[in-house]
Amino acid sequence: MEDSRFTGGSARVRTVAVRCLGQKETVKSQFKVWRGQLSARDFYCEEAVAGGPRALGSALRYDRRRSGSRDRMPRVNRTAVLSLLIVSSCVFLLFQLHYYRKYVSKVRFRLSACVTQNPALVLTRLSSAPVHSRGGALLSPERHVTNRAVQWQVLRKFLAVAQRFRLPLFLADTWALGLLSQDALRQRDPPCGVLCTGRPVLSFAVHASSWRSSPDFLTAARTKGFELLELRGKDPRLSSLDVLSGEEIPLHLLLRRDAFVIHVVFLYERSGNYVWHGPLRLGGGADRTFAPFALLDYGRHAGAYDRSELVLTVLDGLDVRVPRNITHFLLQQRDARFLECRFHEARHFLQLYPDDASAAALDFRRKAKALLHVAARTLGSLHVPFWISSGTCLGWFRQCGIISYSQDVDIGIFISDFRPDIVGAFRDAGLSLKHKFGRVEDSLELSFLSNDVKLDIFFFYEDGDVLWNGGTQAKSGRKFKYVFPRFSLCWAELLELKVRVPCETRDYVGANYGSTWSIPLKNWDWKTSPSNVQENGEWPRSEWAELIQVY
Protein backbone atom coordinates (compact mmCIF):
# COMPACT_ATOMS: atom_id res chain seq x y z
CA MET A 1 0.00 0.00 0.00
CA GLU A 2 1.26 3.48 -0.92
CA ASP A 3 2.19 5.70 2.03
CA SER A 4 -0.25 8.64 2.57
CA ARG A 5 2.59 11.08 3.04
CA PHE A 6 3.50 10.86 -0.66
CA THR A 7 0.16 11.03 -2.43
CA GLY A 8 1.16 14.33 -4.04
CA GLY A 9 3.78 14.93 -6.70
CA SER A 10 4.54 13.15 -9.97
CA ALA A 11 4.26 9.40 -10.56
CA ARG A 12 8.06 9.12 -10.69
CA VAL A 13 8.41 10.77 -7.26
CA ARG A 14 5.80 8.48 -5.78
CA THR A 15 7.61 5.45 -7.21
CA VAL A 16 10.88 6.51 -5.61
CA ALA A 17 9.07 7.11 -2.32
CA VAL A 18 7.64 3.61 -2.29
CA ARG A 19 11.05 2.13 -3.23
CA CYS A 20 12.77 4.05 -0.43
CA LEU A 21 10.14 3.00 2.11
CA GLY A 22 10.60 -0.62 1.09
CA GLN A 23 14.33 -0.34 1.59
CA LYS A 24 14.18 1.59 4.85
CA GLU A 25 14.05 -1.39 7.14
CA THR A 26 16.71 -3.42 5.28
CA VAL A 27 18.98 -0.70 3.98
CA LYS A 28 21.46 -1.07 6.82
CA SER A 29 22.01 -4.75 6.03
CA GLN A 30 21.99 -4.58 2.21
CA PHE A 31 24.03 -1.44 1.49
CA LYS A 32 26.99 -1.64 3.83
CA VAL A 33 30.29 -0.19 2.71
CA TRP A 34 33.75 -1.34 3.80
CA ARG A 35 33.84 0.91 6.89
CA GLY A 36 30.46 -0.19 8.10
CA GLN A 37 28.70 3.02 7.01
CA LEU A 38 25.58 3.38 4.95
CA SER A 39 26.08 4.35 1.33
CA ALA A 40 25.19 7.86 0.14
CA ARG A 41 22.20 6.48 -1.68
CA ASP A 42 20.85 4.97 1.57
CA PHE A 43 21.03 8.36 3.30
CA TYR A 44 19.17 9.98 0.41
CA CYS A 45 16.39 7.44 0.84
CA GLU A 46 16.26 8.13 4.60
CA GLU A 47 16.04 11.86 3.95
CA ALA A 48 13.51 11.46 1.17
CA VAL A 49 11.16 9.57 3.43
CA ALA A 50 11.39 12.32 6.01
CA GLY A 51 11.38 15.31 3.67
CA GLY A 52 8.46 14.68 1.35
CA PRO A 53 8.14 15.24 -2.40
CA ARG A 54 10.85 17.93 -2.74
CA ALA A 55 13.38 15.69 -1.04
CA LEU A 56 12.26 12.80 -3.25
CA GLY A 57 13.02 14.89 -6.31
CA SER A 58 16.58 15.33 -5.08
CA ALA A 59 16.79 11.57 -4.45
CA LEU A 60 15.63 10.89 -8.03
CA ARG A 61 18.28 13.16 -9.54
CA TYR A 62 20.99 11.51 -7.44
CA ASP A 63 19.76 8.09 -8.47
CA ARG A 64 20.12 9.01 -12.14
CA ARG A 65 23.61 10.41 -11.67
CA ARG A 66 24.92 7.41 -9.77
CA SER A 67 23.49 4.43 -11.60
CA GLY A 68 21.89 5.67 -14.81
CA SER A 69 19.15 3.05 -14.38
CA ARG A 70 15.94 2.56 -12.45
CA ASP A 71 17.15 -0.42 -10.44
CA ARG A 72 20.65 -0.24 -8.97
CA MET A 73 22.03 -3.75 -8.14
CA PRO A 74 23.71 -4.11 -4.77
CA ARG A 75 27.50 -3.89 -4.70
CA VAL A 76 29.44 -7.17 -4.62
CA ASN A 77 32.56 -7.76 -2.60
CA ARG A 78 35.15 -8.17 -5.39
CA THR A 79 37.79 -9.62 -3.10
CA ALA A 80 35.43 -12.36 -2.03
CA VAL A 81 34.62 -13.24 -5.65
CA LEU A 82 38.32 -13.30 -6.62
CA SER A 83 39.11 -15.55 -3.68
CA LEU A 84 36.30 -17.88 -4.69
CA LEU A 85 37.64 -18.12 -8.24
CA ILE A 86 41.16 -18.86 -7.01
CA VAL A 87 39.94 -21.59 -4.68
CA SER A 88 37.83 -23.14 -7.45
CA SER A 89 40.78 -23.16 -9.86
CA CYS A 90 43.04 -24.81 -7.30
CA VAL A 91 40.46 -27.47 -6.60
CA PHE A 92 40.09 -28.17 -10.33
CA LEU A 93 43.85 -28.46 -10.86
CA LEU A 94 44.20 -30.77 -7.88
CA PHE A 95 41.43 -32.94 -9.30
CA GLN A 96 43.19 -33.10 -12.68
CA LEU A 97 46.46 -34.10 -11.03
CA HIS A 98 44.71 -36.72 -8.93
CA TYR A 99 42.96 -38.13 -12.01
CA TYR A 100 46.20 -38.32 -14.02
CA ARG A 101 48.16 -40.02 -11.26
CA LYS A 102 45.46 -42.46 -10.28
CA TYR A 103 44.10 -43.45 -13.68
CA VAL A 104 46.14 -42.32 -16.70
CA SER A 105 49.61 -43.20 -15.39
CA LYS A 106 48.45 -46.74 -14.60
CA VAL A 107 47.02 -47.49 -18.03
CA ARG A 108 48.93 -50.21 -19.88
CA PHE A 109 48.56 -50.75 -23.57
CA ARG A 110 48.10 -54.34 -24.66
CA LEU A 111 49.36 -53.25 -28.08
CA SER A 112 53.01 -53.04 -27.01
CA ALA A 113 53.78 -56.36 -28.68
CA CYS A 114 52.11 -55.13 -31.84
CA VAL A 115 54.29 -52.02 -31.80
CA THR A 116 57.37 -54.22 -32.08
CA GLN A 117 55.94 -56.62 -34.66
CA ASN A 118 53.83 -54.27 -36.76
CA PRO A 119 54.38 -50.60 -35.90
CA ALA A 120 52.65 -49.41 -39.08
CA LEU A 121 49.42 -51.10 -38.02
CA VAL A 122 49.60 -49.55 -34.55
CA LEU A 123 50.23 -46.08 -35.98
CA THR A 124 47.27 -46.52 -38.31
CA ARG A 125 45.06 -47.44 -35.35
CA LEU A 126 46.31 -44.47 -33.33
CA SER A 127 45.92 -42.09 -36.26
CA SER A 128 42.33 -43.18 -36.84
CA ALA A 129 41.39 -42.76 -33.18
CA PRO A 130 39.52 -39.61 -32.07
CA VAL A 131 41.70 -36.68 -31.13
CA HIS A 132 40.54 -36.67 -27.53
CA SER A 133 41.58 -40.31 -27.14
CA ARG A 134 45.09 -39.99 -28.57
CA GLY A 135 46.14 -36.38 -28.32
CA GLY A 136 47.63 -36.56 -24.84
CA ALA A 137 49.47 -39.85 -24.62
CA LEU A 138 52.18 -41.94 -26.28
CA LEU A 139 53.53 -45.44 -25.78
CA SER A 140 56.76 -45.81 -23.84
CA PRO A 141 59.14 -48.79 -23.60
CA GLU A 142 57.61 -49.78 -20.26
CA ARG A 143 54.15 -49.82 -21.90
CA HIS A 144 53.01 -46.85 -19.86
CA VAL A 145 51.49 -43.72 -21.28
CA THR A 146 53.83 -40.77 -21.80
CA ASN A 147 52.27 -37.35 -21.99
CA ARG A 148 52.94 -35.44 -25.21
CA ALA A 149 53.89 -32.37 -23.23
CA VAL A 150 56.52 -34.38 -21.34
CA GLN A 151 57.93 -35.71 -24.59
CA TRP A 152 58.03 -32.21 -26.04
CA GLN A 153 59.92 -30.97 -22.98
CA VAL A 154 62.51 -33.74 -23.45
CA LEU A 155 62.99 -32.70 -27.08
CA ARG A 156 63.27 -29.06 -26.10
CA LYS A 157 66.01 -29.81 -23.57
CA PHE A 158 67.91 -31.99 -26.04
CA LEU A 159 67.77 -29.44 -28.85
CA ALA A 160 68.81 -26.68 -26.45
CA VAL A 161 71.96 -28.62 -25.54
CA ALA A 162 72.68 -29.29 -29.23
CA GLN A 163 72.25 -25.61 -30.04
CA ARG A 164 74.52 -24.62 -27.19
CA PHE A 165 77.34 -26.68 -28.70
CA ARG A 166 76.38 -25.69 -32.26
CA LEU A 167 75.72 -29.26 -33.25
CA PRO A 168 73.95 -29.16 -36.65
CA LEU A 169 71.54 -32.02 -36.08
CA PHE A 170 68.81 -32.67 -38.59
CA LEU A 171 65.61 -34.63 -38.30
CA ALA A 172 66.04 -38.08 -39.85
CA ASP A 173 63.06 -39.87 -38.31
CA THR A 174 61.08 -41.56 -41.07
CA TRP A 175 57.77 -41.31 -39.21
CA ALA A 176 58.08 -37.59 -38.48
CA LEU A 177 59.36 -36.81 -41.98
CA GLY A 178 56.50 -38.87 -43.37
CA LEU A 179 54.06 -36.60 -41.56
CA LEU A 180 55.78 -33.54 -42.99
CA SER A 181 55.65 -34.92 -46.53
CA GLN A 182 51.89 -35.46 -46.28
CA ASP A 183 49.16 -32.86 -46.70
CA ALA A 184 50.14 -29.68 -44.87
CA LEU A 185 46.51 -29.11 -43.92
CA ARG A 186 46.29 -32.38 -42.04
CA GLN A 187 45.06 -31.85 -38.47
CA ARG A 188 47.84 -32.33 -35.94
CA ASP A 189 47.59 -32.88 -32.23
CA PRO A 190 48.96 -30.14 -29.97
CA PRO A 191 51.31 -29.58 -28.34
CA CYS A 192 53.53 -32.01 -30.28
CA GLY A 193 51.81 -32.98 -33.50
CA VAL A 194 54.85 -33.70 -35.73
CA LEU A 195 57.80 -34.63 -33.56
CA CYS A 196 55.68 -36.80 -31.26
CA THR A 197 55.10 -39.59 -33.76
CA GLY A 198 53.35 -42.13 -31.57
CA ARG A 199 56.57 -44.05 -30.89
CA PRO A 200 58.92 -43.90 -27.89
CA VAL A 201 61.93 -42.98 -30.05
CA LEU A 202 62.87 -40.14 -32.40
CA SER A 203 65.86 -40.15 -34.79
CA PHE A 204 68.26 -37.35 -35.66
CA ALA A 205 71.44 -37.42 -37.75
CA VAL A 206 74.60 -35.34 -37.71
CA HIS A 207 77.72 -35.18 -39.83
CA ALA A 208 80.53 -36.61 -37.77
CA SER A 209 82.87 -33.79 -38.83
CA SER A 210 80.77 -31.52 -36.57
CA TRP A 211 81.23 -33.79 -33.55
CA ARG A 212 84.10 -31.82 -32.05
CA SER A 213 82.90 -31.18 -28.49
CA SER A 214 81.66 -34.65 -27.74
CA PRO A 215 82.86 -34.88 -24.08
CA ASP A 216 81.35 -31.51 -23.20
CA PHE A 217 78.12 -32.28 -25.03
CA LEU A 218 77.76 -35.63 -23.25
CA THR A 219 78.42 -33.99 -19.89
CA ALA A 220 75.83 -31.29 -20.56
CA ALA A 221 73.29 -33.89 -21.62
CA ARG A 222 73.82 -35.83 -18.41
CA THR A 223 73.37 -32.61 -16.45
CA LYS A 224 69.98 -32.19 -18.12
CA GLY A 225 68.94 -35.61 -16.84
CA PHE A 226 69.65 -37.75 -19.90
CA GLU A 227 70.98 -41.29 -19.67
CA LEU A 228 73.47 -42.05 -22.47
CA LEU A 229 74.50 -45.08 -24.48
CA GLU A 230 77.27 -44.53 -27.04
CA LEU A 231 77.97 -47.28 -29.58
CA ARG A 232 81.23 -47.36 -31.50
CA GLY A 233 82.66 -49.41 -34.35
CA LYS A 234 85.65 -49.72 -36.67
CA ASP A 235 86.29 -47.01 -39.23
CA PRO A 236 86.03 -48.65 -42.69
CA ARG A 237 87.57 -45.60 -44.35
CA LEU A 238 90.93 -46.56 -42.87
CA SER A 239 90.67 -50.13 -44.09
CA SER A 240 92.44 -51.11 -47.28
CA LEU A 241 94.07 -54.11 -48.84
CA ASP A 242 97.32 -53.11 -47.14
CA VAL A 243 96.14 -51.85 -43.76
CA LEU A 244 93.22 -53.12 -41.71
CA SER A 245 92.76 -50.45 -39.08
CA GLY A 246 91.31 -51.21 -35.69
CA GLU A 247 90.49 -47.59 -34.85
CA GLU A 248 86.96 -47.13 -33.56
CA ILE A 249 84.64 -44.20 -34.20
CA PRO A 250 81.25 -43.24 -32.71
CA LEU A 251 78.42 -44.66 -34.83
CA HIS A 252 75.27 -44.19 -32.75
CA LEU A 253 74.28 -42.25 -29.64
CA LEU A 254 71.14 -42.97 -27.62
CA LEU A 255 69.81 -40.51 -25.04
CA ARG A 256 66.98 -41.50 -22.72
CA ARG A 257 64.86 -39.43 -20.38
CA ASP A 258 61.32 -39.93 -19.04
CA ALA A 259 60.97 -43.22 -20.96
CA PHE A 260 61.65 -41.43 -24.27
CA VAL A 261 64.72 -42.19 -26.43
CA ILE A 262 66.47 -39.87 -28.87
CA HIS A 263 68.62 -41.67 -31.43
CA VAL A 264 71.53 -39.75 -33.01
CA VAL A 265 73.10 -41.30 -36.13
CA PHE A 266 76.62 -40.22 -37.15
CA LEU A 267 77.23 -39.70 -40.87
CA TYR A 268 80.73 -39.98 -42.35
CA GLU A 269 82.07 -38.71 -45.67
CA ARG A 270 83.23 -41.44 -48.04
CA SER A 271 85.51 -41.18 -51.06
CA GLY A 272 82.64 -41.98 -53.43
CA ASN A 273 81.08 -38.56 -52.76
CA TYR A 274 78.40 -39.87 -50.42
CA VAL A 275 77.78 -40.16 -46.68
CA TRP A 276 77.71 -43.38 -44.70
CA HIS A 277 76.54 -44.59 -41.32
CA GLY A 278 77.58 -47.79 -39.64
CA PRO A 279 75.49 -50.63 -38.22
CA LEU A 280 74.33 -50.61 -34.61
CA ARG A 281 75.85 -53.55 -32.77
CA LEU A 282 75.47 -54.10 -29.03
CA GLY A 283 78.55 -55.36 -27.23
CA GLY A 284 78.48 -58.04 -24.61
CA GLY A 285 78.14 -55.60 -21.72
CA ALA A 286 75.61 -53.26 -23.36
CA ASP A 287 72.21 -52.71 -21.79
CA ARG A 288 69.79 -54.37 -24.19
CA THR A 289 66.80 -52.84 -22.42
CA PHE A 290 68.06 -49.28 -22.79
CA ALA A 291 65.91 -48.61 -25.85
CA PRO A 292 63.32 -50.34 -28.06
CA PHE A 293 66.02 -51.36 -30.56
CA ALA A 294 63.53 -53.13 -32.82
CA LEU A 295 61.82 -49.77 -33.46
CA LEU A 296 64.94 -47.84 -34.51
CA ASP A 297 64.96 -46.50 -38.07
CA TYR A 298 68.74 -46.84 -38.36
CA GLY A 299 71.34 -49.37 -37.33
CA ARG A 300 69.97 -52.70 -38.52
CA HIS A 301 72.64 -52.44 -41.19
CA ALA A 302 75.04 -49.83 -42.58
CA GLY A 303 73.58 -47.21 -44.91
CA ALA A 304 74.70 -44.92 -47.73
CA TYR A 305 73.11 -41.63 -48.81
CA ASP A 306 73.63 -38.78 -51.20
CA ARG A 307 74.43 -35.52 -49.47
CA SER A 308 71.20 -33.76 -48.53
CA GLU A 309 70.66 -30.02 -48.49
CA LEU A 310 69.19 -28.96 -45.15
CA VAL A 311 66.80 -26.17 -44.22
CA LEU A 312 66.03 -24.73 -40.79
CA THR A 313 62.35 -24.69 -39.90
CA VAL A 314 60.08 -24.60 -36.85
CA LEU A 315 58.27 -27.77 -35.83
CA ASP A 316 56.04 -27.82 -32.77
CA GLY A 317 57.62 -24.55 -31.66
CA LEU A 318 61.19 -25.93 -31.87
CA ASP A 319 63.95 -24.98 -34.33
CA VAL A 320 64.76 -28.12 -36.32
CA ARG A 321 66.74 -28.78 -39.50
CA VAL A 322 65.16 -31.07 -42.08
CA PRO A 323 66.20 -32.28 -45.56
CA ARG A 324 65.02 -29.86 -48.23
CA ASN A 325 63.78 -32.74 -50.39
CA ILE A 326 62.04 -34.91 -47.83
CA THR A 327 60.56 -37.32 -50.37
CA HIS A 328 63.95 -38.05 -51.90
CA PHE A 329 65.50 -38.57 -48.47
CA LEU A 330 62.79 -41.06 -47.48
CA LEU A 331 63.25 -42.97 -50.73
CA GLN A 332 66.97 -43.15 -50.04
CA GLN A 333 66.41 -44.35 -46.49
CA ARG A 334 64.20 -47.19 -47.68
CA ASP A 335 66.96 -48.57 -49.95
CA ALA A 336 70.05 -47.36 -48.08
CA ARG A 337 71.54 -50.71 -47.06
CA PHE A 338 75.28 -50.69 -47.65
CA LEU A 339 77.68 -53.63 -48.07
CA GLU A 340 81.30 -53.05 -47.18
CA CYS A 341 84.01 -54.54 -49.35
CA ARG A 342 85.41 -57.77 -47.87
CA PHE A 343 88.94 -56.51 -47.31
CA HIS A 344 90.10 -59.53 -45.31
CA GLU A 345 89.07 -62.01 -48.01
CA ALA A 346 90.33 -59.75 -50.81
CA ARG A 347 93.77 -59.46 -49.22
CA HIS A 348 93.94 -63.22 -48.87
CA PHE A 349 92.92 -63.66 -52.53
CA LEU A 350 95.55 -61.21 -53.78
CA GLN A 351 98.20 -62.98 -51.74
CA LEU A 352 97.38 -66.12 -53.70
CA TYR A 353 96.78 -64.40 -57.05
CA PRO A 354 98.71 -61.11 -57.23
CA ASP A 355 97.06 -58.42 -59.29
CA ASP A 356 98.45 -57.49 -62.68
CA ALA A 357 100.64 -54.40 -62.30
CA SER A 358 101.53 -53.97 -65.97
CA ALA A 359 101.05 -50.67 -67.75
CA ALA A 360 98.23 -52.13 -69.85
CA ALA A 361 96.39 -53.35 -66.74
CA LEU A 362 96.77 -50.00 -65.02
CA ASP A 363 95.54 -48.22 -68.13
CA PHE A 364 92.48 -50.46 -68.28
CA ARG A 365 91.63 -49.80 -64.64
CA ARG A 366 91.86 -46.07 -65.25
CA LYS A 367 89.59 -46.27 -68.30
CA ALA A 368 87.15 -48.63 -66.59
CA LYS A 369 86.85 -46.25 -63.65
CA ALA A 370 86.12 -43.30 -65.95
CA LEU A 371 83.57 -45.36 -67.92
CA LEU A 372 81.75 -46.50 -64.79
CA HIS A 373 81.52 -42.92 -63.54
CA VAL A 374 80.08 -41.79 -66.90
CA ALA A 375 77.53 -44.62 -66.81
CA ALA A 376 76.48 -43.66 -63.28
CA ARG A 377 76.01 -40.00 -64.19
CA THR A 378 74.13 -40.80 -67.40
CA LEU A 379 71.71 -43.29 -65.88
CA GLY A 380 71.36 -41.12 -62.79
CA SER A 381 70.18 -38.21 -64.93
CA LEU A 382 67.50 -40.54 -66.34
CA HIS A 383 66.61 -41.87 -62.85
CA VAL A 384 67.36 -45.40 -64.03
CA PRO A 385 68.79 -47.61 -61.26
CA PHE A 386 71.51 -50.11 -62.18
CA TRP A 387 73.90 -52.50 -60.48
CA ILE A 388 77.30 -53.90 -61.35
CA SER A 389 76.89 -57.34 -62.85
CA SER A 390 78.81 -60.34 -64.17
CA GLY A 391 82.60 -59.91 -64.10
CA THR A 392 82.47 -56.41 -62.62
CA CYS A 393 80.42 -57.68 -59.68
CA LEU A 394 82.76 -60.65 -59.29
CA GLY A 395 85.76 -58.32 -59.13
CA TRP A 396 84.17 -56.21 -56.37
CA PHE A 397 83.11 -59.24 -54.31
CA ARG A 398 86.30 -61.25 -54.72
CA GLN A 399 89.09 -58.67 -54.74
CA CYS A 400 87.53 -55.26 -53.99
CA GLY A 401 88.46 -54.00 -57.43
CA ILE A 402 88.18 -54.49 -61.15
CA ILE A 403 89.36 -57.63 -62.99
CA SER A 404 92.01 -56.28 -65.32
CA TYR A 405 91.81 -59.09 -67.88
CA SER A 406 88.04 -58.79 -68.30
CA GLN A 407 88.45 -55.79 -70.65
CA ASP A 408 84.86 -54.57 -70.12
CA VAL A 409 82.43 -53.15 -67.59
CA ASP A 410 79.15 -54.99 -66.94
CA ILE A 411 75.98 -53.53 -65.43
CA GLY A 412 72.42 -54.79 -65.02
CA ILE A 413 69.05 -52.99 -65.27
CA PHE A 414 65.56 -54.31 -64.64
CA ILE A 415 63.58 -54.25 -67.87
CA SER A 416 60.83 -52.40 -66.01
CA ASP A 417 63.25 -49.47 -65.71
CA PHE A 418 64.05 -49.36 -69.43
CA ARG A 419 63.69 -45.99 -71.18
CA PRO A 420 63.85 -45.46 -74.95
CA ASP A 421 66.16 -42.47 -74.52
CA ILE A 422 68.95 -44.50 -72.89
CA VAL A 423 70.79 -44.90 -76.19
CA GLY A 424 70.59 -41.20 -76.98
CA ALA A 425 71.74 -40.26 -73.47
CA PHE A 426 74.88 -42.41 -73.75
CA ARG A 427 75.63 -41.02 -77.18
CA ASP A 428 75.33 -37.50 -75.76
CA ALA A 429 77.80 -38.55 -73.05
CA GLY A 430 80.38 -39.42 -75.72
CA LEU A 431 79.87 -43.19 -76.01
CA SER A 432 79.21 -44.98 -79.29
CA LEU A 433 76.67 -47.80 -79.66
CA LYS A 434 78.54 -51.03 -80.48
CA HIS A 435 75.58 -53.40 -80.72
CA LYS A 436 71.91 -53.80 -79.84
CA PHE A 437 70.43 -57.29 -79.49
CA GLY A 438 66.85 -58.40 -78.85
CA ARG A 439 63.78 -56.35 -78.09
CA VAL A 440 62.27 -54.84 -74.96
CA GLU A 441 59.98 -57.84 -74.54
CA ASP A 442 62.77 -60.42 -74.87
CA SER A 443 66.54 -60.58 -74.30
CA LEU A 444 67.39 -56.89 -74.75
CA GLU A 445 71.10 -56.14 -74.53
CA LEU A 446 73.05 -52.94 -75.27
CA SER A 447 76.78 -52.45 -75.65
CA PHE A 448 78.65 -49.14 -75.85
CA LEU A 449 82.29 -48.32 -76.47
CA SER A 450 84.50 -45.63 -74.90
CA ASN A 451 88.31 -45.47 -75.20
CA ASP A 452 88.40 -49.09 -76.42
CA VAL A 453 86.55 -50.32 -73.30
CA LYS A 454 83.11 -51.88 -73.63
CA LEU A 455 80.14 -51.10 -71.41
CA ASP A 456 77.70 -54.03 -71.54
CA ILE A 457 74.16 -53.39 -70.28
CA PHE A 458 72.10 -56.50 -69.54
CA PHE A 459 68.36 -56.15 -68.97
CA PHE A 460 66.82 -58.54 -66.45
CA TYR A 461 63.37 -60.15 -66.71
CA GLU A 462 61.16 -61.74 -64.07
CA ASP A 463 60.04 -65.33 -64.46
CA GLY A 464 58.33 -66.72 -61.37
CA ASP A 465 60.89 -67.22 -58.62
CA VAL A 466 63.89 -66.37 -60.81
CA LEU A 467 65.37 -63.51 -62.81
CA TRP A 468 67.18 -63.85 -66.10
CA ASN A 469 69.00 -61.84 -68.72
CA GLY A 470 69.48 -62.76 -72.35
CA GLY A 471 72.38 -63.13 -74.74
CA THR A 472 72.52 -63.34 -78.52
CA GLN A 473 75.15 -64.76 -80.89
CA ALA A 474 75.23 -62.31 -83.78
CA LYS A 475 76.46 -64.66 -86.51
CA SER A 476 73.94 -67.46 -85.84
CA GLY A 477 70.96 -65.76 -84.18
CA ARG A 478 71.14 -68.23 -81.27
CA LYS A 479 69.61 -67.04 -78.01
CA PHE A 480 70.82 -67.74 -74.48
CA LYS A 481 69.49 -66.92 -71.05
CA TYR A 482 71.30 -66.64 -67.70
CA VAL A 483 69.14 -67.53 -64.72
CA PHE A 484 69.62 -66.05 -61.23
CA PRO A 485 67.75 -66.49 -57.97
CA ARG A 486 65.75 -63.39 -57.01
CA PHE A 487 67.79 -60.72 -55.29
CA SER A 488 67.46 -57.25 -53.80
CA LEU A 489 69.85 -54.34 -54.28
CA CYS A 490 72.30 -52.78 -51.84
CA TRP A 491 74.86 -50.01 -52.09
CA ALA A 492 78.61 -50.61 -52.23
CA GLU A 493 81.72 -48.69 -53.24
CA LEU A 494 83.87 -49.54 -56.25
CA LEU A 495 86.55 -47.37 -57.84
CA GLU A 496 85.58 -44.43 -55.58
CA LEU A 497 81.97 -44.59 -56.73
CA LYS A 498 78.79 -45.51 -54.88
CA VAL A 499 77.22 -48.32 -56.91
CA ARG A 500 74.52 -50.93 -56.38
CA VAL A 501 75.24 -54.62 -56.03
CA PRO A 502 72.94 -57.59 -55.38
CA CYS A 503 72.52 -57.83 -51.61
CA GLU A 504 72.72 -61.61 -51.92
CA THR A 505 76.07 -61.22 -53.65
CA ARG A 506 77.43 -64.68 -52.93
CA ASP A 507 74.34 -66.36 -54.39
CA TYR A 508 74.45 -64.05 -57.40
CA VAL A 509 78.12 -64.70 -58.10
CA GLY A 510 77.76 -68.40 -57.38
CA ALA A 511 74.89 -68.73 -59.87
CA ASN A 512 76.95 -67.10 -62.63
CA TYR A 513 80.41 -68.55 -61.88
CA GLY A 514 79.72 -71.72 -59.91
CA SER A 515 81.43 -72.93 -56.77
CA THR A 516 84.89 -72.12 -58.17
CA TRP A 517 84.22 -68.38 -58.46
CA SER A 518 87.16 -67.65 -56.14
CA ILE A 519 89.65 -69.08 -58.66
CA PRO A 520 90.57 -66.78 -61.57
CA LEU A 521 89.63 -68.11 -65.03
CA LYS A 522 91.05 -66.09 -67.91
CA ASN A 523 89.71 -68.29 -70.71
CA TRP A 524 86.01 -67.47 -70.44
CA ASP A 525 83.40 -68.36 -73.06
CA TRP A 526 80.15 -66.47 -72.43
CA LYS A 527 78.11 -69.19 -74.23
CA THR A 528 79.39 -72.20 -72.30
CA SER A 529 81.40 -71.16 -69.20
CA PRO A 530 78.64 -69.65 -67.00
CA SER A 531 77.00 -72.10 -64.61
CA ASN A 532 73.54 -70.61 -65.22
CA VAL A 533 73.50 -70.42 -69.03
CA GLN A 534 70.63 -72.05 -70.94
CA GLU A 535 69.78 -72.36 -74.62
CA ASN A 536 66.79 -70.17 -75.46
CA GLY A 537 66.03 -70.81 -79.13
CA GLU A 538 66.92 -68.67 -82.13
CA TRP A 539 65.79 -65.37 -83.57
CA PRO A 540 63.84 -65.70 -86.84
CA ARG A 541 66.16 -64.83 -89.71
CA SER A 542 63.53 -62.48 -91.11
CA GLU A 543 63.87 -60.33 -87.95
CA TRP A 544 67.63 -60.21 -87.75
CA ALA A 545 67.83 -56.73 -89.22
CA GLU A 546 65.73 -55.43 -86.35
CA LEU A 547 66.94 -57.68 -83.52
CA ILE A 548 70.64 -58.06 -84.27
CA GLN A 549 72.22 -54.68 -84.89
CA VAL A 550 76.00 -54.41 -84.90
CA TYR A 551 77.75 -51.06 -85.44
Image: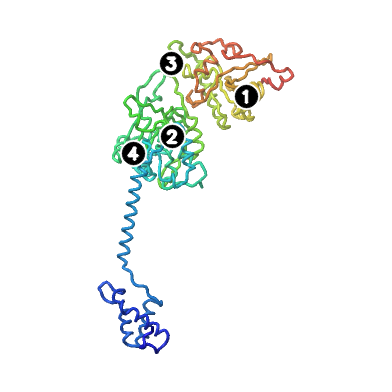
Where residue 276 appears, as percent x and y from the top left, is 43, 29
Residue located beneath label 3 in the image = 345
Of callouts 2 and 1, the N-terminal one: 2
Q: Report the amino acid beneath label 4.
A: Arg
Q: Is residue 331 above or below residue 341?
A: below
Disc 2, disc 4: CB below 8 Å?
Answer: no
- In three-dimensional space, the C-alpha distance between marks 4 and 3, rounded to whole angstroms, equals 43 Å
Amino acid at dot 2: Val
Point out the tag, 2 or 3, that comes first from the N-terminus: 2
Q: Height in image: 506 above or below 126?
A: above
Q: Is residue 127 visible?
A: yes
- Distance, label 2 to label 1, CA atoms, is 54 Å
Foreground disc of the pair 2, 1: 2
Task: Tell me the tag on residue 115.
Answer: 2
Q: CA distance from mark 2 to mark 3?
A: 40 Å
Circle 1 is placed at which residue position? Answer: 432
Q: Nearer the viewer, mark 1 or mark 4?
A: 4
Instruction: Confirm or deny contact between disc 4 and disc 3 (CB under 8 A).
Output: no
Name the residue carrying label 4. Answer: 257
Q: CA distance from mark 2 to mark 4?
A: 20 Å
Counting residues from the N terminus, which is met first, the one under dot 2 or under dot 4?
A: 2
How far apart in space, not on screen, are marks 1 and 3 (Cα)?
37 Å
